Image (cartoon, rainbow, N blue to C red):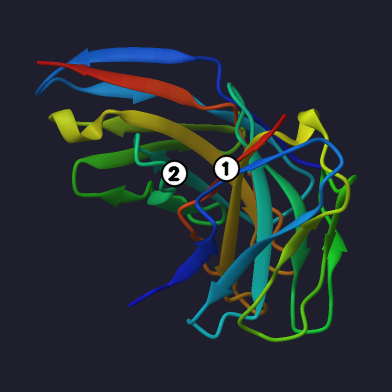
Amino acid sequence: AQTVTQSQPEMSVQEAETVTLSCTYDTSESDYYLFWYKQPPSRQMILVIRQEAYKQQNATENRFSVNFQKAAKSFSLKISDSQLGDAAMYFCACDPIQGAQKLVFGQGTRLTINP
Amino acid sequence: NAGVTQTPKFQVLKTGQSMTLQCAQDMNHNSMYWYRQDPGMGLRLIYYSASEGTTDKGEVPNGYNVSRSTTEDFPLRLLSAAPSQTSVYFCASSSTGESNQPQHFGDGTRLSIL
């Protein structure tokens, strides 16, 4: 069984500043993916970034990067140079690399960008 | 470039009514999923299908039914609607097997049960 915990229900940041969203997880899988999804008010689920657990290198996508600590089962998302369009709910999720793909989501963090 | 299409976008039902939420994908993905999202919570898996003709229960399957008679379609049926099923429902699809690919989501259906 997998669990994903996001301990920050809400976060806020000034435009152009950097913010880090926290996520911890637990899984019995040996190989797995970790994800951050963004859900703006439009309700769409948008993939922000994906990390393969067997890779040591932290994933990056433009202004988005992760700090993946496998031993601590921690997977935080750093957003640099925050923009107004980054305002959304952010969900952390875990998924096995092979076999039945049962995404388990955290409770979400609502990110507000202050102009 | 449709991706995953869900219909309807909004629906209001009375307790005890039945209905089907439609989901179609045009990416030839083998796997499809239904999630529900309740306030203050992340998405929870209701049912999934790893291939045409197969379905499996997720975390919260009670009160729902699914079938997968084609690769493209994965309808979700509410058998007898209850107020506890008021939620936003998301359908998703992905290519899975040797290396699972990220799921693509539809825009969701907001369902209210009175």
**Amino acid type, mark 1:** Ala
At x 34%, y 37%, the residue is A40
Residue B39, placed above or below residue B49:
above
Kindly indicate the quadrant of the structure image that contains residue A73. Answer: top right
Mark 1 surroundings: few (<14), some (14-19) or many (≥20) residues within 10 A? many
At x 88%, y 46%, the residue is B80
B68, A70: nearer the viewer: B68
At x 90%, y 45%, the residue is B62
Residue B49, placed above or below residue A92:
below
Would residue A28 be seen by someone viewing this image from the given angle?
yes
Is residue B18 rendered to the left or right of residue A114? right
Would residue A82 be seen by someone viewing this image from the given angle?
no
A52, A35: nearer the viewer: A35
**Amino acid type, mark 2:** Tyr
Res A53 label: none
At x 44%, y 44%, the residue is A37
Q: Where is residue B64 in the image (x, y as percent from the top left)?
A: 84, 52
> Residue beneath label 1, please?
A93
In primary-sequence order, the first of circles 1 and 2 is: 2
Q: Are marks 1 and 2 in contact (CB under 8 Å)?
A: yes
The N terminus of chain A appears in which quarter of the rendering? Answer: top right
Is residue A33 rendered to the left or right of residue A87? right
Residue A59, placed above or below residue A114:
below
Q: Position of residue B25 (x, y in %)?
A: 53, 76
| Mark-to-mark CA distance, 1 and 2 | 8 Å
B102, B81: nearer the viewer: B81
Q: Where is residue B103 in the image (x, y as percent from the top left)?
A: 53, 62
Is residue A61 rendered to the left or right of residue B99? left
Secondary structure of the residue carrying numbered label 1: strand
Q: Mark 2 lies on which chain?
A: A
Res A37 label: 2
